[in-house]
Amino acid sequence: MADGSLTGGGLEAAAMAPERMGWAVEQELASLEKADCKASEVQEFTAEFLEKVLEPSGWRAVWHTNVFKVLVEITDVDFAALKAVVRLAEPYLCDSQVSTFTMECMKELLDLKEHRLPLQELWVVFDDSGVFDQTALAIEHVRFFYQNIWRSWDEEEEDEYDYFVRCVEPRLRLHYDILEDRVPSGLIVDYHNLLSQCEESYRKFLNLRSSLSNCNSDSEQENISMVEGLKLYSEMEQLKQKLKLIENPLLRYVFGYQKNSNIQAKGVRSSGQKITHVVSSTMMAGLLRSLLTDRLCQEPGEEEREIQFHSDPLSAINACFEGDTVIVCPGHYVVHGTFSIADSIELEGYGLPDDIVIEKRGKGDTFVDCTGADIKISGIKFVQHDAVEGILIVHRGKTTLENCVLQCETTGVTVRTSAEFLMKNSDLYGAKGAGIEIYPGSQCTLSDNGIHHCKEGILIKDFLDEHYDIPKISMVNNIIHNNEGYGVVLVKPTIFSDLQENAEDGTEENKALKIQTSGEPDVAERVDLEELIECATGKMELCARTDPSEQVEGNCEIVNELIAASTQKGQIKKKRLSELGITQADDNLMSQEMFVGIVGNQFKWNGKGSFGTFLF
């Protein structure tokens, strides 16, 4: 130490570390819910809280800014202004980034501030007696609130007795969700950018409003400023709405999906060359010889290909362009980011899936995010832990998954509208939601897979709305077993159930479609259904009818319900066209191409049965 200065961690060690008291921040703020207030009363509310717990004088603190840290003594506290009256401590201790910042300069700065400093800028110095522990904790609460929860524009919003519920609670939840890695990393960046933009817009708006108060009421400058003010206000409102969208736990993942699904493809390299990326944590001579023989040997007449080596699969994926191939060698790989695949590439394991394990750490991001036109993934085991996002999402394009193992944590695979997903010879288990979610307008082909030990096996989203297209689903020779709920669930609105109950019974179509999904249909009903399907499309693959076992009946039950739902969609569409005065509505309710091929699937030991519906 020289000239009263500190280098290293002197002052940092002297100040009470925030992590010592951070555990109590959430608990203390949560208790405020019982005493909600208006936004305009927050400072008064905080002052009342501090008066009860803060020592008014006699303690030391580090005045901490972006430029310096200096030791001060507190002589008094102005609770209403949330400020402390201070003087420089003796001996003078200062740690500054600017060598010319002397004791005299510090005294001048304090004189300019009238020796009154915001409590947020003070870090209480640790005392062995413990007398000032409550003071340190209270100031940490204030600092936490004004740094992470309070927004400078809050007082100008609705001034009702719901500030905690409307603002504090969602922002507090978001803060801790971010700390616990429960928010996608891209969404966190967007949130902080939006916050900075909104703060900047609000600052400009305040400056403009202040200048308007000093202008003549009829001046041309005031008219121009009024227009600028309206633009700033409109911009600020839009930014605030986006912030609220992310702060809302129910809406933030929808917003996150929209952002993450807009990943841009790189396309073909400017050189036109395609590269093979080899991933291996360690490359042994025997493994290299096998690779050269099996996968990297150049065929006669084949264009020479560049090979790049990587130690982890995420860096290989990020280096890919259109047409590249990633070969993952046996090993256990831990990744902390998302596989964002926007180009048509092949990701394949060299060996058995159980020998090639890619484990995802971090709770917020999706494991594999697919937007490429034709993506192929094979021979890999994907493992999730403590996740809040699904293991694989196909936003658009076609993704083929073959001979893979998916050990899920939340939702398994999500197939979004307009996307195509093909899964063959794979094993999916462990999802706390549905193993596979199928959205309207998507195409999903499942062949020879195991889907088990999930909340639900397969969930088909509501497609009855007139704006939705019917999904095209094929399920062949899958084993769906040991799921907590149903093997397959169809989500549909309650109004559909009401319409189905009130449908007229006079037509042959309705008679054929009145199939009891909860009981076993008799032979006559099966024949009617078979004739109806064959008449309608000529393409439908019917499940075998000879075996009355649960496995086969599950196929029939799914077919029956999906056909009924598809037919009802046609009836609703016809009725709406008729109401609009369009009389040439299609009279053939089954004229749409049948969207489902279900055959040879086995349903075993599912908690609620092979098939069910969820009404909303």
Image (cartoon, rainbow, N blue to C red):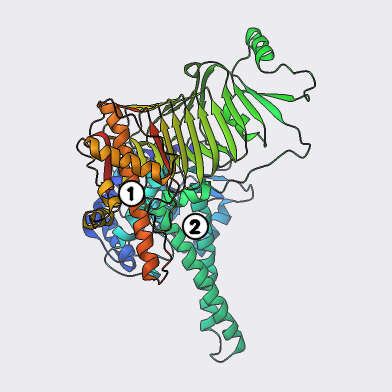
Question: Which residue is label 2 attached to?
Answer: 195
Picture coordinates of residue 454 (x, y %)?
A: 32, 31
What crowding class fits label 1: few (fewer than 14 Cα within 10 Å), some (14-19), or many (20 or more)?
many
Q: Which secondary structure, mark 1?
A: helix
Q: Residue at x 33, y 68 (%)?
A: 40
- Depth check: give the residue in front, 262 or 395: 395
Q: Which secondary structure, mark 2?
A: helix
Question: Which residue is label 1 attached to?
Answer: 565
Q: CA distance from mark 2 to mark 1?
A: 45 Å
- Depth check: give the residue in front, 526 or 491: 526
Picture coordinates of residue 389 (x, y %)?
A: 42, 39
Q: Residue at x 49, y 37 (%)?
A: 421
- Depth check: give the residue in front, 496 or 426: 496
Question: Can residue 70 be seen here?
Answer: no
Three-letter residue code for mark 2 = Leu
Quadrant for the N terminus, please.
top right
Picture coordinates of residue 21 (x, y %)?
A: 34, 41
Q: For the view shown, which residue lies furthest in the top direction? A: 286
Picture coordinates of residue 112 (x, y %)?
A: 52, 64
